[in-house]
Image (tube, grey):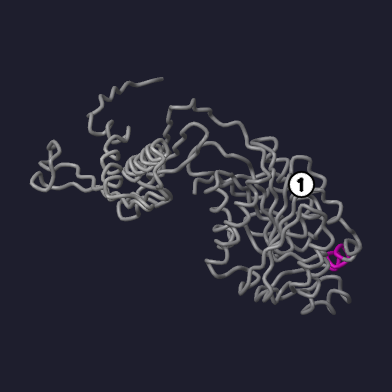
């Protein structure tokens, strides 16, 4: 992923560390803001996979460390759920001031509860997704049980959370208790997607049920069957990312993109790798190379597109002819391969390497057709406009534009 390290101030003037991931090429279609789980950081591996899913859908996504966590400044002991909400709002404002306001909010675990609490106040947010989120923030208070007695007695304690020790203050518990009765879900007024694993041992599945029942439509629920709370299985995180990113495309208002007139094609490549943006009219595509030659395999190769064009044109040409002649043609399947071969294996003009380009095209025709009709359709395949263009050795004029 293309990314940029960013930082911004929290409400107390402390610097928060963030990472803004961009699509591999081109301008973002929209911006997304991600809130990580309790005591986690922006560098959690599962968040990488979720972020990648959004960038592959052409969106940019900001993830950051809450105050006192990861690379952000401040003392974690002085933070609470309210400060997390404040940090989220500062992140939103950072995007709004320096890029574009985020239209999608995604939160994992307590981060999910946080985005539910703030998204209703943020005008440009159009949709919210939660992953393994508690229905109320006070749910995480049980994670502090190892030091609860000391917290109540002394006001401060070392608490073990997930095998790590954090210094906590009683004000954290007090703040959670104050948020216990707040009902924000039914007043969200945003599209909502709830993702939760039935096997989640940290935040039970009943929380997803409570969130879903409280919310008003449009709302959706996806079960991450077999997954754990932190999505430690790579496949689980990739699945969650692809589901949310695809769902989000329905709700984004796409930022202004470069327009390409019908009949023209624009391709653009970045400073690293072979992933190339392809814009044909209103259609955005990606070309790439396989890993064997240093690519990321995020799209067909240039020759893949060449064969695709020939195959599609062949099928369309046969369909047009069959419709015109009222032939009972049900389906056309075209398979194509391209290879460099010695001249004795083909009949095209030799190139400088002593080999020729050989394209093999196999056509399967389905329908109640006579042998004569089938033979004629195969002959018509050679009249495909793309076929004729390739055979005609088109003149290509190249010029530099500034």
* Residue 237 image position (x, y, % from top left): 57, 63
* Residue 402 image position (x, y, % from top left): 41, 20
**Residue 190 vertical placement versus 232 (above, below):** above
Quarter occupied by residue 76: bottom right
Is residue 171 in the magenta section? Answer: yes
Is residue 55 in the magenta section? Answer: no
User: In the image, is 247 to the left or to the right of 169?
Assistant: left
- Looking at the image, which is closer to me, 168 or 233? 233
| Element on which disc 1 rests | helix
Quarter occupied by residue 126: top right
**Residue 71 vertical placement versus 122 (above, below):** below
Residue occupying the point 32% across, 35% down: 384
Residue with the mark numbered 1: 89
In this picture, which residue range is highlighted in magenta? 170-176
User: In the image, is 63 to the left or to the right of 323?
Assistant: right
- Looking at the image, which is closer to me, 218 or 98? 218
- Secondary structure mostly seen in magenta is helix
Residue occupying the point 70% across, 73% down: 161
Q: Residues within 10 Å of mark 1 (few under 14, many from 20)?
A: some
* Residue 400 image position (x, y, % from top left): 34, 21
Residue occupying the point 62% across, 49% down: 18
Q: How many marks?
A: 1
* Residue 206 image position (x, y, % from top left): 78, 72
- Looking at the image, which is closer to me, 98 or 395? 395
Extreme residue in the left direction:
344
Quarter occupied by residue 93: top right
- Looking at the image, which is closer to me, 315 or 391? 315
């Amino acid at each position: 992923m293309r990314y940029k390290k960013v930082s911004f101030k929290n409400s107390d003037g402390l610097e928060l560390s963030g990472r803004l991931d961009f699509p591999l090429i081109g301008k973002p279609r929209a911006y997304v803001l991600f809130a990580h789980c309790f005591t986690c950081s922006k560098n959690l591996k599962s968040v990488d996979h979720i972020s990648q899913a959004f960038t592959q859908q052409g969106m940019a996504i900001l993830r950051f460390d809450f105050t006192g966590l990861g690379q952000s400044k401040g003392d974690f002991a002085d933070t609470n759920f309210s400060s997390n909400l404040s940090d989220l709002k500062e992140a939103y404002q950072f995007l709004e001031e320096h890029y574009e306001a985020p239209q999608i909010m995604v939160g994992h675990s307590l981060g999910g509860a946080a985005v539910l609490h703030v998204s209703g106040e943020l005008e440009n947010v159009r949709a919210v997704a939660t992953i393994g989120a508690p229905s109320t923030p006070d749910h995480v208070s049980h994670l502090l049980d190892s030091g609860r007695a000391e917290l109540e007695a002394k006001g401060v304690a070392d608490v073990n959370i997930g095998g790590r020790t954090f210094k906590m203050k009683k004000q954290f518990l007090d703040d959670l208790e104050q948020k216990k009765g707040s009902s924000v879900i039914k007043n969200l007024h945003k599209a909502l997607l709830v993702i939760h694993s039935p096997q989640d041992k940290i935040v039970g599945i009943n929380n997803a049920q409570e969130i879903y029942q409280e919310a008003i439509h449009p709302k959706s629920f996806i079960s991450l069957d077999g997954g754990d709370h932190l999505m430690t299985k790579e496949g689980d995180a990739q699945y969650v990312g692809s589901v949310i990113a695809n769902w989000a495309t329905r709700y984004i208002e796409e930022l202004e993109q470069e327009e390409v007139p019908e009949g023209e094609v624009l391709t653009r490549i970045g400073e690293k790798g072979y992933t190339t943006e392809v814009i044909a009219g209103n259609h955005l595509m990606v070309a790439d190379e396989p890993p064997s030659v240093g690519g990321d395999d995020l799209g067909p190769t240039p020759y893949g597109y060449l064969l695709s064009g020939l195959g599609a044109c062949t099928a369309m040409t046969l369909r047009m002819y069959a419709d015109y002649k009222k032939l009972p043609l049900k389906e056309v399947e075209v398979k194509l391969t391209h290879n460099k071969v010695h001249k004795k294996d083909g009949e095209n003009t030799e190139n400088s390497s002593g080999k020729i380009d050989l394209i093999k095209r196999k056509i399967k025709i389905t329908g109640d057709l006579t042998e004569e009709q089938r033979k004629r359709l195969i002959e018509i395949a050679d009249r495909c406009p793309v076929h004729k263009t390739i055979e005609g050795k088109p003149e290509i004029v190249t010029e530099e534009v500034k």
